Amino acid sequence: MADSLRARRARRPFPLRQAGLASAVLWFVGVLVVGPAGDLTVPASRMLAIFGAAVVLWITEAIPLSATSIMVILAEILLVSDQALVSIDDFEGRPYAEYFATLAHPVLMLFLGGFVLAECAAKYRLDRNLAGVLLRPFGTSPTAIVAGLMVITAVLSMFMSNTATTAAMMAVVLPVTAGLSPTDRLRTGLILCIPVAANIGGLGTPVGSPPNAIALGRLADEGIRVDFVQWMALAVPIVVVVLATAWLLIVRLYPAEASSLDVRIGGAFDRSTQAIILYVTFAVTIVGWVTEPLHGIPSAIIGFLPVVILFATKVFGVDDLRTINWHVLWLVGGGIALGLGVSDTGLDDWLVGLVDWGSLSTIVLATTLAAVALVMSTIISNSATANLVVPIGVSLATSAAVDLDPLLAGVIIAMACSLAMALPISTPPNAIAYASGHVQTKDLTIVGAVVGVVGLVLVLYVAPPIWEAVGLL
Amino acid sequence: MSDLVVLVIEDEPEVRAALVRDLEAAFTTVRVDQAADVDDALAAMAEADDAGDVVGLILADHRLPGRSGVDLLVELHERDDTRHIRKVLVTGQADQQDTIRAVNEAGLDHYIAKPWDPADLVRVVVDELTDFVVETGLDPLAHMRDLDAARLAAAFAARGRPE
């Protein structure tokens, strides 16, 4: 039956999707047929065919986002790897296995660790119970409760997906809003603060949200290693300032009529052996991640530890494996593969050569990259945006034509992708809040636009000099 | 956008109107449809299907002119295309045999005794429809306003729409 429902929905026309599919095929075939021209070499022209088709498919979502990713990998193997169907003179393609290997890139292993920890945290209600403990010090005044909910949501979403965090926290705030007077604007504030905090919190760690992984994966392939705690040192201060701004705005725009709130989250901690194994593994993993500079073990290897331990001890069972969103890992893998191909084939040099970058100052260039990422990911998925903008931005930064630190470029783009939250469609957390009926588009637009602009100003102009001064860049 | 439909099957016009009124007051994204007997109900279901609407829940009286409500629920349970529809008996007169048959052969999801408490009725319908949306893979966000928002948000998150 579920199939027939889906079939019925699929029969409905999606003009944008059909147009997307048609343009992607047309572009792909067209560019392959036209082939190299001018400075565009044969491998770069093939990669241009793949890149353009990926742009269209990720923007229109003509096929699922992660399907585009694996299609990119297949196309790269068939067109520009050492197993290309038609080989290219004077071009040694990358071994095809390395394109497949992007699906198990260390950054994805790190992400997998995050996924497994998050699933287990939900399974043993560690997320809600921790939230309950963390909320207690905030008391009962509505402004403090909003602050508390935002801090907790942001912290959870640094380690869980922004969407799962939002869903878990909605279960907490919905009953509270139901108890408020229908005229109390706090209802909107309470619901709105959750997706906003979840989106912002996603910036905080490498496992917080896929754009971070896409940037880190691309940087790693350029030989630039950023450890877990270095990313946190770059991102957490931004999270704190942006979160505080959003809080001020929300409590001002949505003043409470109620003078106190009773928010109940969680209950007694699970004390079963399995839950205790989870608590210990969770703590050890996080300590391992943040102490990377001391022991030097890469965060991806530490991130694989909970996967092995929790699976071996059946804390995370075979059935739980199905709850992992593998397609999100594929989506990121495709972005990393796209970056590899763009840089291998020299398409990046060709793209960079299209514009006279020398005439642009570094700050204008960085601002342009960030603004493009922010606008794109306001409308399409943050991860798809990162998949498209990160390879170009990092390639630009590594080229001689431009004086921009590649690490800074990667960080700026990843953060700009996550700071886009001005529409219901901008992020899945926004979609949840909007669907609840308590939040209108204009609520998201006002708070989202302020968060986006304040965040971008911080990331572009305020933070870099500080990062440089303290030796983070 | 296809509608999610609750079908009320009840032969007494006043009772039917009361059921429909209690339900319509509670929902904005769910359509409440009504039928007076089994044939009428099957016609309403065919009509909904043609319109692209999805019947998610049937609230049936047992004693109806012609075939009984339990007969209909058993038939729907045996058909592949209607087995997933949540089935609730709203009745004051079903004897033990009928009730047992509804549970065993129709996969009855809930039993509401007449007279019903409107709040109870709405709670049951919300729970059953939420189950229906989660199990059949309909868009969970489309019905968050009316149904169990927390469960639907969790179902949406579990599907893992990429951020």
Image (cartoon, helix red, strand yellow):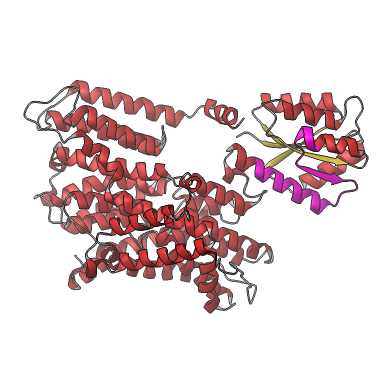
Q: Observer-nearest residue: A347 or A248?
A: A347
Q: Is residue B41 above or below residue A199?
A: above
- Left or right side of A304 for A468: left
Quadrant placement of the N terminus of chain A: top right
Q: Is residue B88 above or below residue A121?
A: above
- Residue A23 screen position, x and y as percent: 34, 27
- Residue A283 screen position, x and y as percent: 40, 67
Numbered-mark total: 0
Q: Is residue A472 above or below residue A405?
A: below
Q: Is residue A380 among the parts visible in the rendering?
A: no
Q: Is residue A412 above or below residue B4?
A: below
- Left or right side of B8 for A431: left
Indicate the quadrant where residue A410 lies: bottom left
Tell me the chief SS of the magenta region: helix
Q: Residue at x 78, y 25 (%)?
A: B42
- Residue A221 screen position, x and y as percent: 19, 48
